[in-house]
Amino acid sequence: MPIQKITREEILLKSADVFRVKGYHNTSMQDLAEACGLLKGSLYYHFPSKEMLMKDLLESIHRLLMEKIFPIAQDEALSPEERMEKLLKKMGKLLLEKEGGCLIGNTTLETVGVVPEFQPVLRTIMDDWTKALQTIFVNKKSPEQSFRLAQQTIMEFEGATMFTKLYGDKQFLYDTFARTMMKLN
Amino acid sequence: MPIQKITREEILLKSADVFRVKGYHNTSMQDLAEACGLLKGSLYYHFPSKEMLMKDLLESIHRLLMEKIFPIAQDEALSPEERMEKLLKKMGKLLLEKEGGCLIGNTTLETVGVVPEFQPVLRTIMDDWTKALQTIFVNKKSPEQSFRLAQQTIMEFEGATMFTKLYGDKQFLYDTFARTMMKLN
DNA sequence: GTCTATATCAAGATAGAC
DNA sequence: GTCTATCTTGATATAGAC
């Protein structure tokens, strides 16, 4: 009987690291297979196509965010400032302290308008990310203003990630974290 | 004798539209040739490779910005507010009111860390863009603060472009324009 | 579940006719 | 300067052995 070398979930995790650095179109099934310690053909046992693999990956990331990160915004044991800090730090660890920047942002700029299948899940992730931040801001501001502040925070976050990538300097992100904390006043 | 169908500069302009929408790796020489009304092989008379074509395009964009857009920041006939408005509007027309968002931002996220040849020119564009905005802010703020404000403006601008692309709503950009004008106070 | 082998196609790039 | 034709490679994907 055959030996299971890697699970479906593990393939997605390894693939995320490759896609984040190389981008969607520039990543080959060969690249993904190597990262997983498999041969190219074996990937097709788990996923019918590269496109479906990426779609599943994005949905898996959305699920992770919804379960582990975004609920921090509603943690009544913490102050709004503590929630914001905890959420930003976790987002930083998850999406930013790895090489290549933010997979969601990268994939958005690279594939929206080109691979229509990805757009809905990318939008959903941004929507729920916005809602989470809004939930924190709403302790201090009106709902409408909190919504705008949440969107602005993510935009600055993505812009800072671009600068961090271009200049190889994480300070851009740390500064954005700090400015976001100040918006809670 | 052969008939000149298109100039080198025109090829770059047509290619910019394709790259902006499809991205660098997802654009084929075939795509570029079609956009230019040429056959694939003919492109290699003008450019030795796809990589060099893109590099020349980025340098051509840099030249255009340095000649036509960034000098607005030093136009002594205008107030700081008027310079900022004029510069932002021109950047909007040049980079944003076309399909696909900002070619510089797209190319940065897609190729930094993957195509090292592009990174210097991308950095130079961002550097000079930052300097131009700093020149305007410095009428109202300290040089250090102006530098930070200039960087933040570009980051927000790129983040807003991402949202505009993802949600198909240009309001994100207009709002960012308005917020930037308010930073001059 | 993974491997080997292979089919198919499109990509970047080159050579030479016109 | 552009076209036709072609080379070579690497991509996605499939079939079948183990």
Image (cartoon, coloured by chain):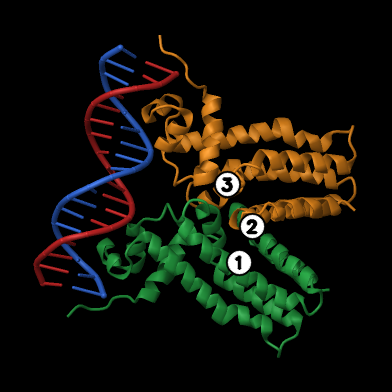
Chain colours: A green, B orange, C blue, D red
- Name the secondary structure under disc 3: loop
Residue C13 position, x and y percent, is 35, 33
Residue A36 position, x and y percent, is 34, 68
Residue under numbered circle 1: A126
Q: Is A170 positioned to the left or the right of B130 in the image?
A: left
Q: Earlier in the sequence, mark 2 or mark 3?
A: 3
Q: Are marks 1 and 2 on the same chain?
A: no
Which residue is rendered at x = 73% and y = 46% of the image? B130
- Count residues near mark 3 (Cα–Cα under 10 Å), then give few for <14, some for 14-19, many for 20+: many
Which residue is rendered at x = 65% and y = 44% of the image? B96
Marks 2 and 3 close (CB-CB < 8 Å): no
- In the rendered image, which quarter is residue A72 located in? bottom right
Q: Quadrant of the N terminus of chain A?
A: bottom left
For the residues labelled 2 and 3, the Cα–Cα distance comes to 12 Å
Residue under numbered circle 2: B163
Of the residues shown, which amino acid type is indicated by label 1?
A: Met
> Residue A66, can we see it?
yes
For the residues labelled 3 and 1, the Cα–Cα distance comes to 19 Å
- Name the secondary structure under disc 2: helix
Residue under numbered circle 3: B100
- Name the secondary structure under disc 1: helix
Residue B139 position, x and y percent, is 89, 45
Marks 1 and 2 close (CB-CB < 8 Å): yes
Of the residues shown, which amino acid type is indicated by label 3?
A: Gly
Of the residues shown, which amino acid type is indicated by label 2?
A: Phe
Residue A81 position, x and y percent, is 75, 79
In the displayed orientation, state which residue is furthest to the bottom.
Answer: A77
Which residue is rendered at x = 45% and y = 25% of the image? B46
